[in-house]
Amino acid sequence: MSRIETEARDLLLQRRRALRREQPVLSGSDPFDDGTPGGVLASQALAELAQIDEALGRIARGSYGTCVACGGPLGLQRIRAIPEARYCLGCSGQRPSDD
């Protein structure tokens, strides 16, 4: 594992732990859609957790740092700014805000 992958992995794991600690335990069948502003925040956190887990999977598979659309490099500055990024700058402008 490269140094940048190790740094990204550490940051992603820290953020994942923080997000999981922040989540309230809600009763009901769907705790992330309870109709309250907290439910909206919880669903956003759930989406971020999914992005973090996807990035950790790319690190494990050895494809981290590569754009999932064009296969080009994401760039070191982009990875450091957004470790869970999936698209390079060129491709991210063509996607509906998923980075």
Image: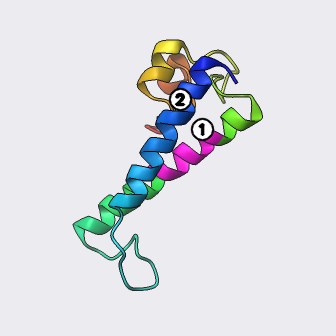
Q: Main secondary structure of the magenta part?
A: helix
Q: Is residue 53 above or below residue 98?
A: below
| Vertical placement of residue 86 versus 4, above or below | below
| Quadrant of res 2 | top right
**Does 36 sit left or right of 15 as displayed?**
left
Task: Identify the residue at the far right of this view.
Answer: 61
Q: Which residues are magenta?
A: 48-56
The reply to whether callout 1 and callout 2 are in contact (CB within 8 Å) is: yes
In x, y percent, where is residue 92?
Answer: 50, 26
Residue in the image at 35% along x and 78% along y: 26
Q: Secondary structure at mark 1?
A: helix
Give the number of the disc on residue 25.
Answer: none
Q: Is residue 88 magenta?
A: no
Residue at 68% across / 21% down in the picture?
70
Compared to residue 17, the image places residue 77 above or below, namely above
- Residue at the location (36% across, 64% down)? 23
View extreme (left): residue: 37
Please give the residue where the numbered disc 2 appears in the rendered image.
8
Q: For the view shown, which residue lies furthest in the bottom direction?
A: 28
Measured Cα–Cα span from mark 1 to mark 2: 9 Å
Scheme of image coloration = rainbow
Q: Which residue is mark 1?
A: 55
Q: Name the amino acid type tagged 1.
A: Ala
Amino acid carrying label 2: it is Ala
Residue placed most toward the observer, 85 or 93: 85
Of marks 1 and 2, which one's residue comes earlier in the chain? 2
Q: Nearer the viewer, mark 1 or mark 2?
A: 2
On-image quarter of the N terminus: top right
**32 or 61, nearer to the observer:** 61
